[in-house]
Image (cartoon, grey):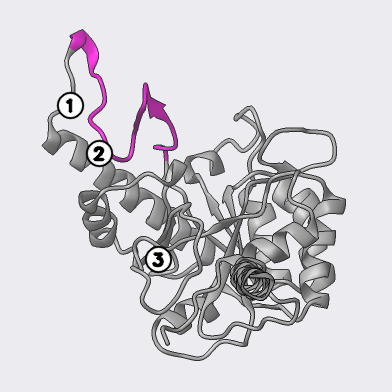
Amino acid sequence: MPTRILMACLLLAVILYAGYDTLVPKADETYRDQVAVLMYHHVHDTDHSASTVSTALFREQLSYLQSRGYNFISLTDFKQFLGGAPVPDKAVLVTFDDGYKSFHDFAYPVLRELQVPAVNFIITKDLDAPLAPPIPALSPEEIRAMLQEMPGLIDIQCHTNALHFKEGKNAALTAPLPLEGGRTETAEQAEQRVRQDSEACAHKLDGLYGRDGAGDTFAYPYGIYSPRTQEIISAAGFKYAFTIIGEMATRFSDPLALPRINAGNPGIDPRKLDVTIRQRVVHPAP
């Protein structure tokens, strides 16, 4: 009887260890043929929110990932990867949403110091009056300076022209909006509004870069989209679009529904970010 109990205990230990080993990433785990796309919003040293990280934490996150063998790639590298080109092992793409001025003032110096590429999805209507929003936005002059200083490493893309808001629980990008007199847009009117907004966003991005076709990448506000939204922005010239689905991006990812891993929370320290990425690695089927 004691022998049988001992064998049962040993078997249970093996099962528990095997389960633990699959849940906790190995320290030296390397992934390939996939990209961890990180999402940030606001880097600032006096503002505080669930989507704001300090300059120090931002630098610590990026430096720690570099020390762990991660390789930061540009948006151009990422798009080529989706088309079949190789990327380095442990590839990472840094993205920002909303086009805040804090990107230029706080995040950009760190990116330049560490030579880390990044893309910021901006709300292009703010280009006309950057200081008008509650959180000041990037100015055209700041954007052009960054594009010139870090060519090919800094990208600016679309987060809608003027549709980054909700009406109740509905995102302006995906639902009909109320009209005067208690009426509501028809489906056709809503689609026309989204189409015009997407075309305006692409046109303004082309103006920033000084060439046609520069605006080809989109980030859905709040991560909300629909199949019809994808069709509309695609018709406006956007070939890629990002969500907030916390997964790794692979060549099998829908180019108009690309996943991203949130890194822009003040509670995400460098080691936690490392573990979070490794827990999302897509392993080949045996």
On the image, the x and y values in percent for residue 227 come to 22, 53
Identify the element where label 3 is drawn: loop
Labelled disc at residue 67:
none
The residue that mark 2 highlights is: 193
Query: Magenta segment range?
Result: 162-182
Residue 103 location, x and y as percent?
A: 71, 51
Q: Which residue is mark 1?
A: 185
In whole angstroms, how far apart are the C-alphas of marks 1 and 3? 28 Å
Q: Residue at x 27, y 43 (%)?
A: 194
Left or right: 204 in relation to 40: left
- The residue that disc 3 covers is 216
Residue 170 at x, y = what percent? 33, 29
Is residue 143 on the magenta stretch? Answer: no
Question: Pointers 3 and 2 in contact (CB under 8 A)?
Answer: no
Secondary structure beneath disc 1?
A: loop
Q: Earlier in the sequence, mark 1 or mark 2?
A: 1
Residue 172 drawn in magenta: yes
How many residues crowd around disc 1 within 10 Å: few (fewer than 14), some, or many (20 or more)? some
Q: Nearer the viewer, mark 1 or mark 2?
A: 1
- Can see residue 227? yes
The amino acid type, in three-letter code, at marker 3 is: Asp
Residue at the spot x=56%, y=85% of the render? 32
